[in-house]
Amino acid sequence: MVIDQIPKSDTTVVLGDANAKLGKEDIYKEVSRKHTLHELTNRNGEMLLEFAIGNNLTVMSTQFQHKRIHKGTWLALDQATLNQIDHVLITSKKKDLIKDTRSLRGPNIDSDHYLLKITLSQTLPKIYTTKNRVQIDSWNKSNLNNPTKLLEYRRVLYTKLKDQTQSQKGP
């Protein structure tokens, strides 16, 4: 399975149309919360929740309290049946990265599904710490007061600039 090939250190996000209705049963409370449109989980929902448990994922589309219209992701042709069947799953240890999920009813995407909006908060890791930071030596300004060293500096700089200019002009 593709998910087994993902390094454990990476953040895994699974999203899409699962045709899964997730209910409010206590048995799944470790991966799914009660903020869902449905009271009972259907068979596709059971398979999705088993997948989430087996792969250490959390269903984020049921974690946030919203009005009913912002939970539904699919509207039937009768215009009365609203279902929440599109879901977002993320690695359980990284679930704090998702700040919100909700459906957007406004954009017309020529589909019977509504867009699902996910708000992420990603903090970038510190590349440099005070322990790892390379100390850059500051300029020794006294060398610029020494005529011999100043002349040597100008000669090296002139040579490098001349070589760079010639290499840009080509043969």
Image (tube, helix red, strand yellow):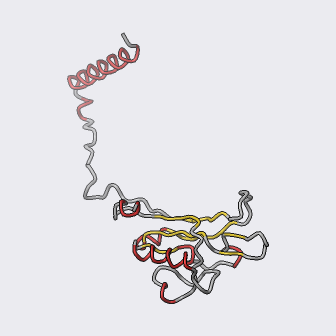
In the picture, measured across the screen, residue 56 lies left or right of residue 108, that is: left
> Is the residue 138 above or below the residue 108 in the image?
above
What is the tally of numbered marks visible in this picture? 0
Q: Position of residue 46 (x, y in %)?
A: 51, 79
In this view, the residue in front, 7 or 77, is 77
In this view, the residue in front, 146 or 35, is 35
Q: Residue furthest bottom?
A: 26
Q: Residue visible at 54% across and 88% down?
A: 25
Q: Residue visible at 74% across and 63% down?
A: 106
In this view, the residue in front, 83 or 170, is 83
Q: Residue furthest top?
A: 171
Q: Position of residue 103 (x, y in %)?
A: 66, 68
Q: Position of residue 1 (x, y in %)?
A: 39, 62
Q: Position of residue 119 (x, y in %)?
A: 57, 65
In which quarter of the view is residue 148 placed?
A: top left
Q: Residue visible at 25% across and 58% down?
A: 131
Q: Residue visible at 27% across and 45% down?
A: 136
**Quadrant including the C terminus:** top left
Q: Residue furthest left?
A: 148
In which quarter of the view is residue 137 placed?
A: top left
Q: Residue furthest front?
A: 43
In which quarter of the view is residue 19 placed?
A: bottom right
In this view, the residue in front, 154 or 8, is 8
In the picture, measured across the screen, residue 148 lies left or right of residue 123, that is: left
